[in-house]
Every structure is written in C-alpha cells, then in structure tokens.
Amino acid sequence: MLNKRWLIQLGGSAILLGIVFWILPVSSVVEALSSISAKVFAAVLVLFLLAHVAAALKWRALLGREVPIGQAIRAHYAGLAANLCLPGAVGGDAVRAGLVMKAVNDGPHLVAVSLIDRLIDMLALVSLAMVGLLLSQVDGISTT
C-alpha cells in the first residue's frame, strides 16, 4: 500500500511539472534537452555520482570509525533514496545511520556526526552562494 504522504508529494510534483510545461513551450524544452550531447550528459552524471561518493567518504571520515568504504557508500545512497520517500531530510540520515550502526556501535556519536555533516554542507552552500554573489557583482550582473 502506498503511503498517503508520498502520494501527495508525487501529485504535487506532477502538478508543478504540469505548470512548468503549461508555461514553457514543450517544443522549446525538448529542443533544449536534445541540445545536450550524450557525452556531456554521461560526464555530468558520472561527476554527480562521484560527488556523492565523495560525500559518503566525508561522512565516513567524520565517523572516525571502522566502517568499510563500500558500506559507507551503500548507506549514503540508501539515505538518498530514503529522502525521496520519507518525510523530511532527517529520514535519510536515520536510514544511513541505521545501516552502519552495527559497525559503529555508538548512537550518540552517529547523531553528532550527522549534525556536523549537515553543518559542513550548510557552510559550504553558504560559501558558494557568497562567492556567486561576489562574482555577479564583479561581472556587473544585477542581482535585482
């Protein structure tokens, strides 16, 4: 049986996507998508997946414990999948932690590492946004 909340999220996403295609000409969207070469698409996909592997390794390093690399990567991707289905991003963190709990055997440490991991990600995003803002001012691009 499908979760009611999940169905609401799916329906909301479908409605928003429908609005986008109602506002934008479908032919223009198809043209833009077809302008991306298969090589560029594959390269970006590989880089995206490698970035998530790096994120899993960052989390593993923060744990400072004997979690095998493969297990850390599997837990990270399982957490990403859980974020698609469970309410809130914390659901993914719980799944990720649950999959390595036996190896770590320290719940408070896992919670602290998850908080630190989120803080690092937040600071990185703020830093990127600030660099983008500064670069947009240097290039004379108006932000208003």
Image (tube, rainbow, N blue to C red):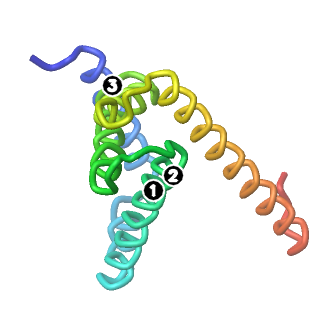
Instruction: Determine the residue positioned at 38% across, 47% down.
Output: 66
**N-terminal label among 3 and 1:** 1
Q: Do labels 2 and 1 touch, CB within 8 Å?
A: yes
Residue 36 at x, y percent in the picture: 38, 78
The residue that mark 1 highlights is 57
For mark 1, give the secondary structure: helix
Residue 131 at x, y percent in the picture: 80, 62
The residue that mark 2 highlights is 61
Asked if residue 36 is positioned above or below residue 117 in the image, the reply reads below
Q: Decide if residue 38 is in sight here.
A: yes
Report whether 122 appears left or right of 27: right
Residue 117 at x, y percent in the picture: 57, 41
Q: Quadrant of residue 91?
A: top left
Instruction: Determine the residue positioned at 45% across, 56% down.
Output: 57
For mark 3, give the secondary structure: loop
Q: Nearer the viewer, residue 10 or 34?
A: 10
Q: CA distance from mark 2 to mark 1?
A: 6 Å
The kind of residue tagged 2 is Ala
Q: Which mark is residue 131?
A: none
